[in-house]
Amino acid sequence: MKTLNDHLILYDADCPMCKAYTKAFTRSGMLGDGGRASYQNIPDEVCPLVDRQRAVNEIALVNTQTGEVSYGVESLFKVIGNSFPVFKPLFGFGPFIWLMKKVYAFISYNRRVIIPAAHEVQGIQPSFRLGYRLIYLVFTWLMVGSILTVYAHHLTPLVPLGDLLREYYICGGQVLFQGIVISLYRPAKRWEYLGNMMTISLAGALLLLPVLLVAKFVALTPIICTLCFLGVAGLMFLEHIRRTKLMQLGWLLTISWVVYRLLLLIVILN
């Protein structure tokens, strides 16, 4: 594997995903040992040509010899393409570049609600793009609804089976319900909270996939599937508490989150 020397990639120290994949670059030898640094700890005079705000939104790769700076997918393509030349034609293909830029932006502008920082962050923060946040909410809603629609068949007869769109209604209803609560309680945190809440829902749905996989080969009783579902719900509850604490939102939203689910359970069982 060829190492990209004389380059420095600037990652977000408050982004666990950014730290993980840039560390993978250096550990694997794709970048040199000193080939990564957090932009929060780099003095302006070290990288004078770096656009700080853009580097927060799109990871920057600096050529330490020429001072040339690339951002976002272009940075990643340079690192990966240098180590794996077979991908260079793909990385130069216009439609693929366009698609990857959209995917990168989708992840970058939502990264703080996908995996939040474990502490209060300071300094320049990622720009907020409402469009990308709405796309994220719709994406997670569709994913959660589709997984739970399949899983619902494994809960019968303990939990009555509804129509094909029931789980989509439930998930979308929670977004609206919690959206009203957060808008009345702390409107400035509305989109941050809703993004975090839907990440929790998506994580819970993904945790049910192994159960669905096992159920394809082993006959699982409704009781087992229900217990697995309740276990995942418990983990989601704990994660909701953790994230609302990080956002300094208190207990109100966790209480309303639970109340909504309990009310729905009563309606479904009756």
Image (tube, rainbow, N blue to C red):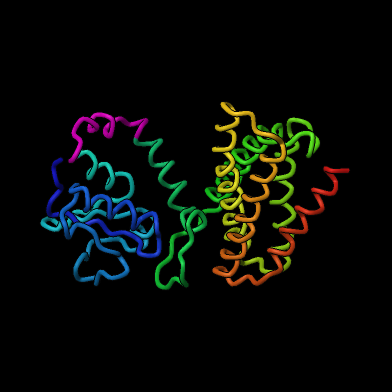
Residue 144, horizontal then vertical, whole percent: 62, 41
Residue 71, horizontal then vertical, whole percent: 30, 51
Q: In the rendered view, would you say 43 is above or below 267?
A: below
Q: Between 219 and 203, which is closer to the camera in this rendering?
A: 219
* Residue 92 within the segment the image draws in magenta: yes
Q: Quadrant of residue 239?
A: bottom right
Q: Residue at x 84, y 43 (%)?
A: 269
Q: Is residue 270 left or right of residue 72?
A: right
What secondary structure is the magenta-colored segment mainly?
helix
Most extreme residue toward the left, as rendered? 65
Q: Residue at x 57, y 63 (%)?
A: 243
* Residue 264 within the segment the image draws in magenta: no
Residue 267, horizontal then vertical, whole percent: 85, 46
Q: How many marks?
A: 0
Q: Between 30 and 67, which is closer to the camera in this rendering?
A: 30
- Image quadrant in which the C terminus is located: top right
